[in-house]
Image: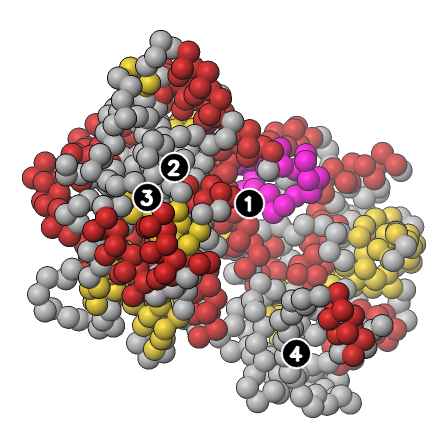
């Protein structure tokens, strides 16, 4: 088992995250038969579903709308949430190692979510699902929609990013696992599948170090930053993605009511940090600490 | 840091070796043009004094040239300093050794001056008073901005024997004066750091028409004075097109107010152009009015592989016609450059033990050329469709053998890091001879191939640069500096460039390094007129002496 795991590791590395001098070494490796599911006669039929969210690009400086109703998204570069990219990459690697047969990417929101899904398809997802909704979707609604889609698609694994970088909720994965009554592993930094036993072994990053969980499939896994490094979309794959199918749903068709129990009252920028002052003496410093900062 | 230091040492050691190959009489007016950064001086003493009482010249990767110290300059005295203190105030007249050490040394640590005085004026009037005084006293003046130049244009020289140089740094003149959102015209003082202007404009929804690696230190006055190029030139053109007006102080202290904000103004000679790219030799730029483009939200970046240089050229032509108005950068590097960057990353990886965005976007290493194409536009879906269609078409036509398209800003920056990592990787690789040439695009890579033939196994020849602008950065990398290699490179590279009507300095300027090489790119008649202009505007030759023009034309005894 240990040897097999090592091989899987190397296969992962060979994707494209290393500078090329390594590749020469790895090319010879890839000519060896790749590790596939143990029972080679029976091709894997597991489907993996990955939720991907369209967010303001992480390198963009966030601006609050003048009317304080939310964050400005007009004329702002939008991209796939980085944690979702990692989730998708992991699903693709599992499929490439022969442990899954299909990767389905799901996105929810306005029509431009199709662009994000196209990125997912160009990375290698087999097909996409777009749940079109114009109003704001909160975690619970998203979890409910995902639950409905899981009932339609019947995946063996549901991958999500641990959180989206726009609202930083870190709730959806947990909620959908609860709604489905599936086991969950959040903040995954390593995922190993045993197809035969129908078990996923997941390392999660916790305050004290690493925690290893063993989950029965089907399960929900949310991904952390160090799990993998997502691949780039190559031109041939962008070309292939154009003919892949994106199926559209409305929340109504999935029997989900998108009214929310939450109301956003106001969105404001964090207060600007005040400039420091230079004090001229220790006495002045003590005075300020005592009477202004009230810390001593 | 240590590594950088070591490279500097190596570089300097080489330079000093070259220094001693041309004997000269020892006299006050025939003294070595340059002093060296610390540590290097020992070599000078050891060899220079040891070799039978002769002082010889150093050459900086360029053929040796005799520069005589201009004897007509006066020596800085106590009265001068108190006069400056009177007009600028005590704390803007700097004589502190540590501060002066930085102001006297260029960014590459290749040139070192020994000026004893640095002035930091706050207003145009102060600059005017300083220059008027220096002109009457015949004190030499070096205008300085961020001091990030690559050709030694911003450091004082020849001050070893008597101190006659005053450095004027306009860094304290850093106010933004006005910004008009309708026309996009920015008016600011010369000492504004480029990056500060970029972030000011970003809040207004605009960008600077130029972008370069030194943006965190370089100042707009210096950018204008050196006509800095950079990555966006293919889209927005040079500063000759973007600068709408200037305020300049002449050598005699007269202030030329040409600070217009108009796009069109055909009234007489457009004198501001004389000060764009003249490297502070005709006047000191104190205020700049510049046209800034709107910041567009849709940026796409593709990293592509081509099998030969001909494909790169065809791809450029195709990009110009198919991407047209949205094309904003077209850069290239050859596989030698790519190998260096990869090797550099691998080394870095060992040290840092993480990936640092170092992945190669393309799977195979078998490509000969790599091209970066950036588009900037206003409509995301339209631009995306356009660049995808262009890329797929080029792939079908066989112009591109492989490629990736950035899906977010993070991926885009990691592609840029490959292109921008080349100079750094070259510095790490050992000795490097750098040339910045403008050449007709179809001839550009021939030079790289010819140099490979000339040098054979002795050195690596690397070609990269701004293909869209016809600007080749030819770099020759060797384990160490070597006279035999140097003799194979110069003057051949300059002659070749001249033969193909190219420019021996595309964007770096002439400075001190190439002042005497100007004839490779400009006719004697043209240079003569330049000399007359210099004489007219700076009759005492006090402004940035020994730079830009050949010595005899810029100094009058």
Chain assignment, label 2: B
Mark 4 falls on what kind of element? loop
What residue would you read off at disc 1? B361
Placement of B507 over or under B345, stated as above or below: below
Of tags 4 and 1, the one toward the viewer is 4
Query: Magenta includes B357?
Result: yes
Dot in front, 1 or 2: 2
Magenta residues, start to end: B339-368
Looking at the rendered structure, the secondary structure element under dot 1 is loop
Which of the labelled discs sits on residue B76, or is there none?
Answer: 3
**Label 3: how many Cα within 10 Å (few below 14, some 14–19, many 20+):** many
Measured as percent of width and height from the top left, residue B28 is found at 28, 26
Residue beneath the point at 80% across and 52% down: A189
Q: Secondary structure at mark 2?
A: loop
Asked if residue A37 can be seen in this view, the reply is: yes
Question: What chain letter is assigned to the residue under label 1?
Answer: B
* A87 displayed left or right of B313: right
Where residue A168 appears, x then y in whole percent? 73, 71
Q: Chain of mark 3?
A: B
Farthest top residue in view: B52
The chain that hosts pointer 4 is A
**Same chain for the residues at labels 4 and 1, yes or no?**
no
Which residue does the numbered mark 4 point to in the structure image?
A271
Q: State the residue at coordinates (62%, 54%).
A: A124
Q: Which residue is mark 2?
A: B113
């Amino acid at each position: 088992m240990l040897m097999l795991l090592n091989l899987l590791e190397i296969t992962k590395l060979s994707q494209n995250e290393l500078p090329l001098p390594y590749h020469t070494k790895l090319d010879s490796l890839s000519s060896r038969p790749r590790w596939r599911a143990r029972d080679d006669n029976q091709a894997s039929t597991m489907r993996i579903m990955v939720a991907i969210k369209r967010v303001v690009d992480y390198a963009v400086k966030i601006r609050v709308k003048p009317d304080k109703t939310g964050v400005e998204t007009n004329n702002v570069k939008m991209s796939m949430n980085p944690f979702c990219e990692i989730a998708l990459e992991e699903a693709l690697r599992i499929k490439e190692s022969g442990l899954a047969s299909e990767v389905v990417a799901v996105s929810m929101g306005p029509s431009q979510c199709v662009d994000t899904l196209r990125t997912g398809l160009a990375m290698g997802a087999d097909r996409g699902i777009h749940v079109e909704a114009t109003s704001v979707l909160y975690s619970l609604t998203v979890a409910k929609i995902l639950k409905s889609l899981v009932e339609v698609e019947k995946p063996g694994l549901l991958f999500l990013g641990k959180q989206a970088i726009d609202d930083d909720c870190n709730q959806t994965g947990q909620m959908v696992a609860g709604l489905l009554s599936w086991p969950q592993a959040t903040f995954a930094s390593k995922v190993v599948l045993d197809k035969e036993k129908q078990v996923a072994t997941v390392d999660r990053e916790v305050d004290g170090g690493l925690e290893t969980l063993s989950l029965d499939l089907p399960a929900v896994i949310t991904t952390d930053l160090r799990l993998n490094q997502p691949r780039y979309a190559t031109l041939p794959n962008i070309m292939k993605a154009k003919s892949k199918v994106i199926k559209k749903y409305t929340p109504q068709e999935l029997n989900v009511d998108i009214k929310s129990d939450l109301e956003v009252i106001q969105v404001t920028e964090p207060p600007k940090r005040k400039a420091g002052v230079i004090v001229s003496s220790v006495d002045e410093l003590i005075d300020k600490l005592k009477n202004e900062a009230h810390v001593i | 840091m240590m590594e950088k230091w070591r490279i500097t040492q190596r570089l300097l050691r080489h330079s000093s070796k070259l220094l001693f190959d041309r004997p000269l009489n020892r006299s006050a007016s025939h003294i070595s043009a340059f002093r060296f950064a610390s540590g290097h001086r020992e070599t000078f003493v050891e060899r220079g004094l040891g070799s039978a009482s002769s002082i010889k010249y150093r050459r900086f990767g360029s053929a040796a040239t005799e520069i005589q110290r201009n004897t007509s300059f006066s020596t800085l005295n106590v009265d001068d300093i108190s006069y400056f203190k009177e007009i600028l105030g005590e704390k803007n007249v700097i004589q502190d050794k540590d501060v002066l050490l930085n102001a006297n040394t260029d960014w590459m640590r290749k040139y070192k001056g020994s000026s004893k005085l640095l002035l930091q004026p706050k207003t145009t009037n102060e600059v005017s008073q300083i220059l008027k005084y220096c002109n009457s006293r015949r004190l030499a003046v070096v205008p300085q901005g961020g001091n990030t130049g690559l050709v030694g244009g911003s450091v004082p020289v020849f001050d070893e024997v008597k101190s006659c140089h005053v450095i004027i740094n306009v860094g304290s003149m850093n106010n933004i004066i006005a910004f008009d959102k309708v026309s996009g015209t920015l008016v600011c003082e010369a000492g504004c750091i480029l990056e500060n202007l970029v972030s000011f404009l970003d809040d207004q929804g605009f960008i600077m028409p130029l972008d370069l690696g030194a943006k965190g230190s370089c100042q707009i006055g210096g950018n204008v004075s050196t006509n800095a190029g950079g990555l966006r030139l293919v889209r927005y053109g040079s500063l000759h097109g973007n600068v709408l007006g200037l305020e300049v102080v002449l050598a005699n202290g007269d202030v030329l107010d040409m600070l217009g904000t108009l796009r069109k103004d055909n009234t007489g000679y457009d004198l501001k152009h004389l000060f764009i790219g003249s490297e502070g030799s005709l006047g000191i730029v104190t205020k700049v009015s510049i046209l800034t483009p709107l910041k567009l939200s849709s940026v796409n970046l593709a990293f592509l592989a081509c099998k030969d240089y001909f494909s790169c050229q065809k791809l450029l032509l195709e990009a110009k016609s198919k991407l047209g108005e949205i094309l904003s950068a077209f850069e290239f590097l050859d596989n030698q450059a790519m190998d260096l960057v990869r090797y550099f990353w691998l080394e870095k990886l060992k040290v840092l033990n993480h990936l640092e965005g170092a992945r190669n976007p393309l799977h195979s290493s078998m490509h000969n050329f790599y091209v970066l194409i950036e588009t900037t536009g206003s409509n995301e879906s339209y631009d995306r469709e356009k660049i995808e269609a262009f890329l797929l078409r080029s792939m079908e036509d066989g112009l591109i053998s492989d490629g990736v398209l950035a899906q977010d800003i993070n991926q885009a920056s990691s592609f840029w890091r490959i292109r921008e990592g080349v100079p750094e990787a070259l510095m790490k690789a050992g000795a490097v001879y750098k040339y910045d040439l403008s050449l007709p695009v179809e001839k550009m890579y021939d030079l790289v191939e010819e140099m490979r033939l000339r040098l054979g196994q002795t050195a690596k020849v690397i070609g990269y640069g701004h293909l869209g602008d016809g600007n080749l950065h030819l770099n020759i990398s060797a384990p160490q500096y070597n006279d035999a290699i140097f003799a194979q490179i110069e003057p051949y590279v300059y002659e070749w460039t001249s033969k193909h009507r190219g420019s021996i300095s595309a964007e770096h300027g002439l400075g001190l390094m190439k002042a005497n090489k100007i004839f490779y790119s400009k006719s004697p008649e043209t240079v003569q007129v330049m000399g007359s202009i210099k004489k007219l505007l700076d009759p005492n030759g006090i402004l940035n002496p020994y730079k830009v023009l050949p010595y005899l034309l810029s100094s009058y005894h």
